[in-house]
């Protein structure tokens, strides 16, 4: 966990959903992840929130929540990791928090996603043994001035604990 972050009541709700829920829809992901993504997306003012898994040279969307009028990705979609922003964040080639992603796309640092992306938040989901499971991400079509990467990091650490061997 990131010690420089103080959870509030919202984060307690997230924690309760991820830690206290024992039912699982996917053998790897807690059933509550969909609700957690919805809460995160709404609280952060984003259009999309998702958990991806990086394995076998691909990024696969394992859980997704989108604003009702905008759903550019769906669970099960996958692409080569080199085409993903997720892999670049994991490797440190892109920052975890991009207040405005447009300059990163314009400069070629981020692949063109084929849609406007304003604010983009992404953090690795790292298991206890140091293995990167994937990422927890969210993005909006517009710029969100108060994007909070610490909230995403906190949630990713709770999710990683649920993905540990023997959990779920």
Image: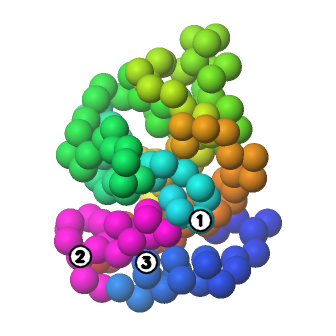
Residue at horizontal 54%, vertical 51%? 46
- For label 3, the SS is helix
3 or 1: tag closer to the N-terminus: 3
Mark 2 vs mark 3, CA separation in Å: 10 Å
Please check the rendered image and state whether residue 30 is part of the magenta-colored stretch, yes or no.
Answer: yes
Does 140 appear above or below 28? above
In which quarter of the view is residue 24 placed? bottom left
Q: Assess whether mark 2 and mark 1 are in contact (beta carbons under 8 angstroms).
A: no
How far is disc 1 from disc 2 in space, using C-alphas?
24 Å
Q: Is mark 2 on a helix, strand or loop?
A: loop
Relative to 145, say whether 33 is above or below.
Answer: below
Give the residue drawn at x 25%, y 35%. 78
**Answer yes or no: do the residues labelled 3 and 1 have beta carbons within 8 Å?**
no
Quickly name the residue at label 2: 24
State which quarter of the image contains the N terminus: bottom right
Q: Which of marks 2 and 3 is nearer the N terminus?
A: 3
Q: Mark 1 points at which residue?
A: 43
Q: Where is residue 110 in the image (x, y as percent from the top left)?
A: 54, 21
Query: Where does label 3 land, which residue?
Result: 18
**5 relative to 76, above or below:** below
Answer yes or no: is residue 98 visible.
no
Residue 162: x, y in percent?
39, 72
The one nearer the camera, 40 or 84, is 40
Say left or right for 43 vs 77.
right
75 sits to left or right of 14: left
Kindly state the secondary structure of the residue where label 1 is placed.
helix
| Residue extent of the magenta highlight | 22-39
Q: How crowded is mark 3: few (under 14 residues within 10 Å), some or many (20 or more)?
A: many
Question: Which mark's residue is nearer the viewer, 1 or 2?
Answer: 1
Viewed as shown, does residue 96 lie left or right of 166? right
């Amino acid at each position: 966990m990131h010690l420089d972050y103080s959870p509030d009541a919202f984060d307690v709700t997230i924690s309760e959903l991820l830690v206290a829920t024992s039912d699982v829809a996917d053998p790897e992901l807690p059933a509550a992840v969909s609700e957690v993504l919805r809460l995160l997306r709404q609280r952060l003012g984003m259009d999309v929130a998702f958990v991806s898994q990086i394995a076998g040279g691909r990024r696969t969307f394992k859980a997704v929540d989108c604003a009702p009028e905008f759903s550019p990705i769906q669970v099960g979609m996958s692409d080569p990791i080199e085409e993903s922003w997720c892999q670049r964040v994991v490797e440190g080639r892109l920052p975890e928090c991009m207040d405005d992603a447009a300059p990163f796309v314009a400069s070629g640092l981020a692949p063109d996603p084929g849609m406007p992306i304003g604010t983009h938040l992404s953090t690795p989901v790292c298991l206890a043994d140091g293995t990167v499971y994937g990422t927890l991400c969210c993005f909006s079509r517009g710029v969100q001035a108060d994007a909070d990467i610490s909230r995403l990091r906190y949630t990713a650490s709770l999710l990683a604990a649920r993905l540990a061997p023997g959990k779920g």
